Image (cartoon, helix red, strand yellow):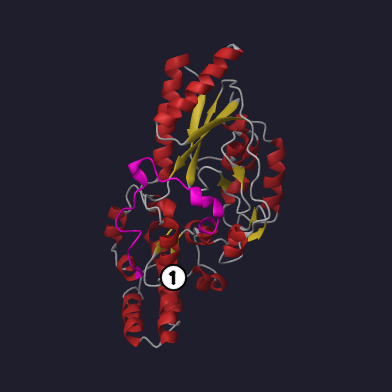
Amino acid sequence: MESESRLEGLAGHIRQWARELGFAHAGVADLDMADAAQGLEAWLARGMHGEMDYMARHAQLRAEPAALVPGARRAVMVAMDYAPQDAEWVSNAWATLRDDERAYVSRYALGRDYHKVVRSRLQKLADRIAAEVGPFGHRAFCDSAPVMEVELARRAGLGWRGKHTLLLSRERGSTFFLGSLYLDLPLPVDAPASDHCGSCSRCIEACPTGAIVAPYRLDARRCISYLTIEAKGPIPVEFRSAMGNRIYGCDDCQLACPWNRWAQPAAVPDFAARHRLDAATLVELFGWTEDEFAQRMAGSAILRIGQARWLRNIAVALGNALRASAEAGDETRAESLRCALRARADHPDPIVREHVGWALAQG
């Protein structure tokens, strides 16, 4: 059994090693999740997880971490910043959302796949720990297993759960990825962060589809991030207009949050925008061939949804742009959008065809 002082010293080393590996913050949480499990069960019972069946299927593993990693006693939680380097990134993001010719991709997905970046660095952190204490039981996660990451990060002192359900920090807003390292070492735990949302409701008011149905409660079935990434079938017609030009994810609740004035730029180069995803037009991205999509999205989190869903999402955005052009009487722009859509009218995927048809009917 490690002595208490040695464990405290090790926890301090872990924080330092984490910073050296590009993590902005690290803390330690216990793994007794019994109280948090009740909230998860209530959310699942309301069906707010939509098609994300894995949330219900693996609910017990979220509530009982030791069932996921036998012998686990603590979670080392880390945060890695991803905000763009541009100090004006929030106002630039709003400008892109107002420009219906351009595609909006959630800022977290502009660069390389965060799952791989965070998890590989967590494994390096585990290697550093092993070099110090010898072999130990552990497993690294980054949005890749049934782990209550936000709750564990809150307990580890990395921040508090905002009313939009994301983790918030006074030092870095919400633009950071979370990673978890379950381990069997009884490290001393950190104190949870206190809530600093107060009476603010900007995130709730900013949601285009009303997905934040109450403070701290998100109905995924209404969320544009869910609709463009997780949902495999047709996007419900009732939400298509509200999607605007958001083709992968949605940042509105974060862009509206006052705490993101403190968002920190990415400390690693992996999250810099690739293939003009922060500036591309809808027509440009809609024209990518299947091979171009696979090549350009290699190493990106976007690759996971496949080209058909990518085209489905862009077709909705093109339909919204076509409607706006028709209403403005800009026939030249409207016809260019129709031409782009007609090129996919006979796409082999029936869902893509249906969304293209819907889009053409908008103007």
> Residue 334, relative to residue 168: is it above or below?
below
Task: Please give the name of the residue rendered at 28% of the width and 63% of the height, measured from the top-left corner.
Answer: 289
Quadrant of the drawing holding the C terminus: bottom left
In the picture of the structure, the residue carrying the numbered disc 1 is 98
Task: Please give the name of the residue rendered at 44% of the width and 35% of the height, measured from the top-left corner.
Answer: 23
The stretch of residues the image draws in magenta is 254-282
Asked where in the image residue 220 lies, by quadrant, the reply is bottom right
As shown in the figure, which amino acid type bears the numbered disc 1? Answer: Arg
Residue 295 position within the rendered picture, expressed as x and y whole percent measured from the top left: 28, 53
Q: Nearer the viewer, residue 154 or 312?
A: 154
> Residue 310, relative to residue 131: is it above or below?
below
Residue 111 makes an appearance in the image: yes
Task: Please give the name of the residue rendered at 70% of the width and 56% of the height, measured from the top-left corner.
Answer: 46
In this image, 340 relative to 69: left or right? left
Quadrant of the drawing holding the N terminus: top right
- Magenta region includes residue 32: no
Q: Nearer the viewer, residue 316 or 88?
A: 88
Residue 231 makes an appearance in the image: no
Residue 158 position within the rendered picture, expressed as x and y whole percent measured from the top left: 56, 37
Task: Please give the name of the residue rendered at 55% of the width and 54% of the height, measured from the top-left corner.
Answer: 258
Give the SS element for disc 1.
helix
In this image, 283 relative to 209: left or right? left
Q: Nearer the viewer, residue 90 or 151?
A: 90
- Magenta region includes residue 262: yes
> Residue 83, relative to residue 155: is it above or below?
below
Residue 287 position within the rendered picture, expressed as x and y whole percent measured from the top left: 30, 68
